[in-house]
Image (spheres, grey):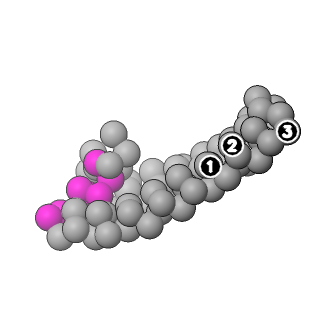
């Protein structure tokens, strides 16, 4: 995203990223269920929820601060 030459390319890449994200998230739930059993599965799903929520909470302010530098800087976090 940070290397997109124009805003139109950025929108195109974000659309592709959204499709890929919608496929990967359900897969992580299934993988945790397959790899762990019993109480460990419950703990694994809980950890996935906790770390996912924390990342969403922290990434928004960080992205906003980086956007004050330039519009493409928040996308460097994906590297």
Residue 43 falls left or right of residue 34:
left
Instruction: Give the secondary structure at mark 2.
Output: helix
Residue holding disc 1: 48
Question: Which span of residues is magenta-colored?
Answer: 69-76
Between circles 1 and 3, the one closer to the viewer is 3
Residue holding disc 3: 38
> Is 47 a magenta residue?
no
Q: CA distance from mark 1 to mark 3?
A: 16 Å
Residue holding disc 2: 44
Q: CA distance from mark 1 to mark 2?
A: 6 Å
Number of numbered discs visible in the structure rendering: 3
Height in image: 8 above or below 19? Answer: below
Quarter of the image where the C terminus is located:
top left
Residue found at the very far top of the displayed protein: 35
Q: Residue at x 31, y 64 (%)?
A: 63
Q: Residue at x 75, y 38 (%)?
A: 40
The residue nearer to you, when weighing 53 against 64, is: 53
Height in image: 73 above or below 79? Answer: below
Percent across and percent down for residue 14 are 47, 56
- The crowd level at tag 1 (other Cα within 10 Å; few <14, some 14-19, many 20+) is some
Please tell me which of labels 1 and 3 falls first in the chain. 3
Please tell me which of labels 2 and 3 falls first in the chain. 3
Instruction: Give the secondary structure at mark 3.
Output: loop
């Amino acid at each position: 995203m940070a290397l997109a030459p124009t805003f139109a390319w950025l929108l195109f890449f974000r659309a592709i990223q959204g499709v890929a994200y919608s496929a990967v998230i359900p897969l992580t739930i299934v993988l945790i269920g397959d790899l762990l059993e019993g109480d460990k599965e419950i703990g694994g799903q809980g950890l996935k929820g906790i770390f996912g929520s924390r990342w969403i909470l922290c990434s928004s302010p960080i992205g906003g601060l980086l956007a004050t530098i330039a519009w493409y800087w928040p996308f460097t976090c994906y590297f």
